[in-house]
Amino acid sequence: MPKDKKKKSALAAAASRRLASIGAPQMSPEQLAHALLHAEERGEAQRVPLEDGTWAWAMQDGNGQTRLLKPTPPMLEALDRFEREGHPAH
């Protein structure tokens, strides 16, 4: 019986993840980095240092709360490429 509960909770978790993604834009790491770069230019996001020596984008959500988004390695690679191609990354 506990095995069935485990399957149900895994299934429920998968369903929750699927429901959370419905209607959300599906962006590649490069597209997301590019969008956040432009959000920085408009003043809608800013880079803030983190305690571990890295940084994250800080932005307001729909409820006025500040949210942090730490870039992934593919996002950092895209930002580096944008900078090499003449699009300022910061």
Image (cartoon, rainbow, N blue to C red):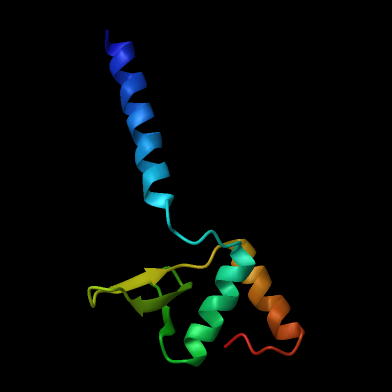
Residue 60, how many percent across, how many down?
A: 31, 78
Q: In which quarter of the view is residue 23 placed? A: bottom left
At horizontal 42% and vertical 91% (from top left) the residue drawn is 43
Instruction: Please state, as top left, top right, bottom left or bottom right, where the N terminus lies in the image.
Output: top left
Q: Is residue 29 above or below residue 49?
A: above
**Is 78 displayed left or right of 39 in the figure?**
right
- The foreground one among 22 and 71 is 22
At horizontal 35% and vertical 35% (from top left) the residue drawn is 13
- The foreground one among 75 and 53 is 75
Name the residue furthest right: 85
**Is 27 displayed left or right of 45 in the figure?**
right
At horizontal 48% and vertical 84% (from top left) the residue drawn is 39
**Is 31 displayed left or right of 52 in the figure?**
right
Residue 62, how many percent across, how many down?
A: 28, 74
At horizontal 41% and vertical 86% (from top left) the residue drawn is 44
- The foreground one among 50 and 82 is 82
Q: Is residue 53 above or below residue 7?
A: below
Residue 63, how many percent across, how many down?
A: 22, 73
- How many numbered discs, if any? 0
Name the residue furthest front: 23
